[in-house]
Amino acid sequence: MRMTLAVAVLLALLPLGLPPYAMTLLTEALIMALFAMSLDLMVGYARLISFGHAAAYGLGAYTCGNILLHTDIPLPFAVLIAGVFSGIVAIGVAWVCTLATGVSFSMLTLAFAQLLYAVAFKWTSVTGASDGLAGIPRTKGPFGTAFFGTKMGFYYLTMACLFGSFLFARAVVRSPFGAVLRGIRENEAKTLSLGYNTRLYKIAVVAMSYMLGGLAGALYAPFAGFANTELLFWLLSGQVLIMVIVGGTGTLVGPILGAVFFLLVQQQLSTYTDSWALVFGAIFILFVLFAPEGILGLARRRRAH
Amino acid sequence: MPLLELQGLTKRYGGILAVDQVTMAVEPGEVRAVIGPNGAGKTSLFHLITGVVKATEGDVLFDGQRVTAMPAFGRCQLGMSRTFQITALFPEMSARENTSLAAQARDKQRWRPLGGGSVFAEAQRRGDAALERLGLTHVAHRPAGLLSHGDQRLLEVAMALAQQPRLLLMDEPTQGLSVEETAQAVDVLAGLFAAGDLTVLLVEHDMEVVFRLAEKITVLHRGAVIADGDPETVKADATVQSAYLGGYA
């Protein structure tokens, strides 16, 4: 708790000393961090590997984009609504995907994300097809304030979403519900035989994961000012899974570090080469081989020595 | 009224008749064993009772309620707790976390996604009591996967006990144990059953174990019941001797 507070204070003070360009990068990092953390709920705690988490992100982004383009709902509320919407859709998705387990489950999540990707190309009136949604505004409010539309205000909004989601997710994994998730992770058949309807627990955690992932996507739309089909593409699903694994699964904090690390590497390497993904691929392989517990695991190992 | 009643229970896999018209009952407070040679249908019968597979014909009644179509987790919620033939635990959790998670399944707020300190406290209390009853308190904090094989088997029983079951179902409780481990486990189980507060149905092929633990025995052969009664009667039964015991008694 003290650590969380210290990081929150540090992040809250950063805007005072950082140039605008760095602020933009930091905001994007926090959005990605939220996205990766949301996936960790499924992957790290229930061993439900999603290959289609971009579905949550894209759903949140398009929903929030449409709300901001067509209504006067204040920015923070639009973001929240989009996140909740993504979570509600996920109940249906998870209901189908949890008919399968293991790799088949993963393939179904991928199939669903690709389905949304295809729909986004065709449903022009809602998604703008291949042009995407452009010129997504940052609406005023609540109470008429324009603060959340400013660079600094939007940063604080993002930070609040990340910390709120982190505290929520941490409470969930430490709750009785979270204990059942760990049971599912270690031995689902046994958990079922103890009298837990494991499928309902899985659907619930997927919904929570999509809700927080949708929140991240909902922040991205007004952050970038646009939403396009790339936000639903499998490439993003793969990248976020890599962030989770490199950061350390089943820790919530690890994937946050993983996302920041990923963006930093991308930022630094892409100035030298277009093939930065090749280098990150190598980093990923090294982590899987030599530090499967991720960045956070490495840090903890060092501290233990 | 019997706690568990099977009425003409039948399971067919294609052309193979695994369980054939089995009718039997388990009275409250009774320790009953189902025995039979390999392939007699013991495990199939066990799956039908726990709800892992669905019956082709016939009914399973628990406390007078028909549960034939109820899924496994539903039957567990009614008070049927089971152990597995091949030890099934949460290997990375401590023994204590294993029993606590088992006990939590009986709490109405077992699914609570936020808070839940009182749920954990109650589950741990019940779990610890079960660990103590099986003499596992000294390994409570060790990861379940690192316990000796004998202790792992007993931990599984402790998990079932932590649920305060009305019916305890055990699938070959000494499967895979060495001779010494089997003797120790049987001693612990005999002590447990002696308290008389449990209703137990166990499936077992080790005759010595069965005659040590069971008060009543049902004998299966080729999926059908060929004898039913107390150990002495069953031992003396001519059909049983020719079908199975092969001169053991």
Image (cartoon, coloured by chain):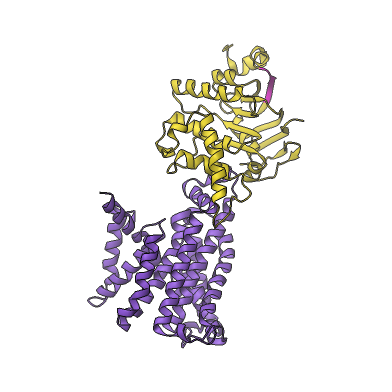
Q: Residue at x 44, y 43 (%)?
A: B93
Say how many tags the image has: 0
User: Where, quadrant-wise, is the N terminus of chain A in this rendering?
Assistant: bottom left
**What percent of the width, then of the height, locates residue A301?**
29, 51
Q: Nearer the viewer, residue A95 or A295?
A: A295
In the picture, residue B231 is in which quadrant? top right
**What percent of the width, then of the height, locates residue A28?**
38, 75
Q: Nearer the viewer, residue A128 or B57?
A: A128
**What percent of the width, then of the height, locates residue A26?**
35, 75
Question: Does the stretch in magenta take in B41?
Answer: no
**What percent of the width, then of the height, locates residue B99?**
52, 39
Is residue A254 at least partly visible in the picture?
yes
Question: Is residue B175 shown left or right of residue B25?
Answer: left
Q: Is residue B6 above or below residue A281?
A: above
Q: Nearer the viewer, residue B152 or B40?
A: B152
Question: Is residue A127 shown left or right of residue A251?
Answer: right
Chain identifier of the purple chain: A
Main SS category, magenta section = strand
In the picture, residue B241 is in which quadrant? top right
Q: Residue at x 45, y 72 (%)?
A: A160
Q: Is residue B132 above or below residue B191?
A: below
Is residue A55 at least partly visible in the picture?
no
Q: Nearer the viewer, residue B39 or A60?
A: A60
In the picture, residue B146 is in which quadrant? top left
Q: Is residue A154 above or below residue B155?
A: below
Chain part drawn in magenta: B225-230
Question: Is residue B29 shown left or right of residue B186?
Answer: right
Question: Is residue A4 shown left or right of residue A175?
Answer: left
Which tint was used for chain B? yellow
Q: Residue at x 52, y 61 (%)?
A: A206
